[in-house]
Amino acid sequence: MQEFETEEQQIEAIKKFWKENGTAIILGAVLGLGGLWGWRTYSDSVIESKEQASIEYQKVVEELSKEGASINPGVEFVESTDNSGYATLAALQIAKQAVERDDLDEAGKQLKWAADNSGDDVLQSVANIRLARVLKQQKNYADALSTLDSVAQKAFSAQVNEIKGDIYQAQGNIDKARVAYSTAIEEKENNTLVQMKLDNLASENVEGD
């Protein structure tokens, strides 16, 4: 049996165990009680609901991919489905289409909804990053920076700092832009695009002098 030096280590081990095995344990319990009509009905209902949400989501994606297609079916799906995961994915798709059509207000609306309603940290981070880009395009720099600060996933740190650099550059704050770009490069090596942005700052500084 593995021993732990502190209570914190025990807690982390329990969290890890449930993360890796929790779903299987719950599913096993449901299957074990499958002989009881109530549990079986509940399980079948959940599975059927998820399958239906998946089918409807695929229809929305196919519809949105058509040239000149309306985003209304996607919006209706987001507002009506009980599955927050598929609703979030649909909102991200709608936002993408809206940006391509230069409808930044609709894109921002969908991304804000996704960020506020997603139960998944990664999807929430993606939504906030895209929302920050939209806000930057709208020159709403303060809200864009605030939105980036709410991105919790460390895996997106380089991306967050790159966008912060873009915002600071747009504001004319070259010093802060330089720090943000440099931090992004430290967090993700061989980031050619960000290195180019950093080099361009140096060129702009020389020209400004």
Image (cartoon, rainbow, N blue to C red):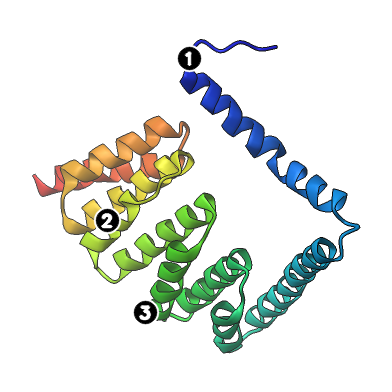
In the rendered image, residue 16, in percent from the top left (x then y), is placed at 61, 31
- Closer to the observer: label 1 or label 3? 1
| Mark 2 lies on residue | 146
Q: Amino acid at mark 1?
A: Thr
Tell me the SS state at disc 1: loop
Tell me the SS state at disc 3: helix
Q: Choose between 76 and 185: the one closer to the eye.
A: 76
**x 67%, y 83%: residue:** 63
In the rendered image, residue 125, in percent from the top left (x then y), is placed at 46, 53
- Quadrant of the image containing the N terminus: top right
Asked whether the residues under the numbered discs 2 and 3 touch, taking CB atoms below 8 Å apart as contact, a structural biologist would say no
**x 59%, y 81%: residue:** 80
* Circle 2 Cα neighbour tier, 10 Å, few/some/many (<14 / 14–19 / ≥20): few
Q: Earlier in the sequence, mark 2 or mark 1?
A: 1
* Circle 3 Cα neighbour tier, 10 Å, few/some/many (<14 / 14–19 / ≥20): some
**Quick one: which residue is furthest to the right in this view?**
35
Asked whether the residues under the numbered discs 1 and 3 touch, taking CB atoms below 8 Å apart as contact, a structural biologist would say no
Q: Amino acid at mark 3?
A: Asp
Query: Marks 2 and 3, Cα distance to the nearest angstrom?
Result: 18 Å
Q: Choose between 81 and 5: the one closer to the eye.
A: 5
Q: Residue 105, labelled with which disc?
A: 3
**x 42%, y 64%: residue:** 116
Q: Choose between 51 and 176: the one closer to the eye.
A: 51
